[in-house]
Amino acid sequence: MKIVLAYSGGLDTSVCIKWLEEKYDAEVITLTMELGQESGDLREIEEKAKKLGAVKTYSIDAQSEFVENYINPAIWANGLYEGKYPLATALGRPLIGKWMVDIAHKEGADAVAHGSTGKGNDQVRLDVTVKALDPKLKVIAPVRQWPMTREEEINYAREHDIQIPVTVDDPYSYDTNLWGKSAEAGPLEDPMNEPKEACMQLTAPPEQAPDEPHYVSIDFHRGLPVALDEKVVDEVELIKQLNQLAGAHGVGRIDMIEDRLVGIKSRETYECPAATVILEAHKELERLCLTREQNSFKPALDQKWGELVYYGLWYEPLKDDIQSFIENTQKYVTGKVRLKLYKGSCTVVGRESPQSLYDLGLATYDKGDSFDHTSAEGFINIWGLPSRTSGERKKR
Ligand code: ARG
């Protein structure tokens, strides 16, 4: 049996290699994906997999693909789950799932495997993605199957000569990519505990951030960021720079109680500096460039899009339908937003656009006013007619 395993190099997936070899007498092929988590040298991870018996190893730098096909639709949709979480992990999983299927086909594998637990959202996202792309391909989730506790797993690793990472004492579980880092477990499981600095890596503590605010500008073209401080940069690079910059000012920390798909409430913290800034700026530009009707209707679809993605339904046809609608709204979302980063806060302080619907002549209270005041009276008479009629009824 040939199995393609999504391999991070960490303890769980390292144990998976040995376990799959033992349990299924399998030839294991590993797939390691770079989505901007910068977890180290991909070659070293491949070496580690080979040492554990992997017959073949792949590593794929999919950062550009991740930005283009996953993060960008999320920017258009102002993608947030339950109004707070920018969906970083939820966006990464369907991409990983897609590559697992591609490599399985290329290698003629019988199954794919991943290290997700049986309590989280990630198993759903990966399993559903694989099944959507190839209903016949078997999915194995060893961590969901084996009855090992953490301690037993560490013992298993010792017995099988699996190098145990120093981070094994770290009580938190992390997941990181370009769009942010999540942390859960350990002391975070008490929702009343303030998150400790130990679980934060991408952001400075706001109280220790610089005393001077930092101003940054982002240019958007059709709803996507194209320049940072007026310098045009590749979007992967733009997101990385913004993670650094906003992170240094303590921007992008999120502490939330989240409703998982599997019915569990969990306490999670996120660090999403770039996502926070880009989404704030994008939302503001939409206010300037979309009509009142678009601005009132679109958030309902944005929310639905985010839920479908969070729930692992990347390939649900409704998601595509909504995405087409959302993409169509973006054709005038072009312009510049200025933001102020200061000790954990990110505030929009200015916006402009060649496609702006803001008309100074109409808005001004000073001279140059072009609004026809005389037409207001007639408009109000008709606009308020239903209220007047029902008011008269009350009097009768
Ligand atoms: N709660 C977030 C989500 O469901 C993050 C999950 C992080 N995954 C992980 N394996 N630590 O998208």
Image: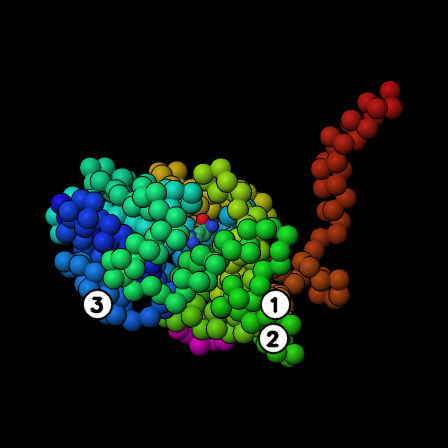
Looking at the rendered structure, the kind of residue marked 2 is Ala
Q: Secondary structure at mark 1?
A: loop
Q: Secondary structure at mark 3?
A: helix
Where the C terminus falls, by quadrant?
A: top right
Q: Position of residue 183 (x, y in %)?
A: 48, 57
As measured in the structure, the alpha-carbon distance from the residue carrying label 1 to the one carrying label 3 is 40 Å
According to the image, label 1 marks what residue? 344
As measured in the structure, the alpha-carbon distance from the residue carrying label 2 to the one carrying label 3 is 39 Å
Looking at the rendered structure, the kind of residue marked 3 is Glu
Q: Position of residue 171 (x, y in %)?
A: 48, 59
Kindly tell me whether mark 1's CB lies below 8 Å from ligand 1.
no
According to the image, label 3 marks what residue? 47
Q: Position of residue 154 (x, y in %)?
A: 35, 56
Residue 231 is at least partly visible in this image: yes
Looking at the rendered structure, the kind of residue marked 1 is Gly
Q: Secondary structure at mark 2?
A: loop
Is there CB contact under 8 Å for labels 2 and 3?
A: no
Depicted 38 relative to depicted 7: above or below: below
- The magenta segment is 228-233
According to the image, label 2 marks what residue? 209
As measured in the structure, the alpha-carbon distance from the residue carrying label 2 to the one carrying label 1 is 8 Å
Tag 2: Cα neighbours inside 10 Å, few (<14), some, or many (≥20)? some
Residue 338 is at least partly visible in this image: no
Seen at 75% across and 36% down, the residue is 384
Q: Is residue 70 left or right of residue 343?
A: left
Is there CB contact under 8 Å for labels 2 and 1?
A: yes
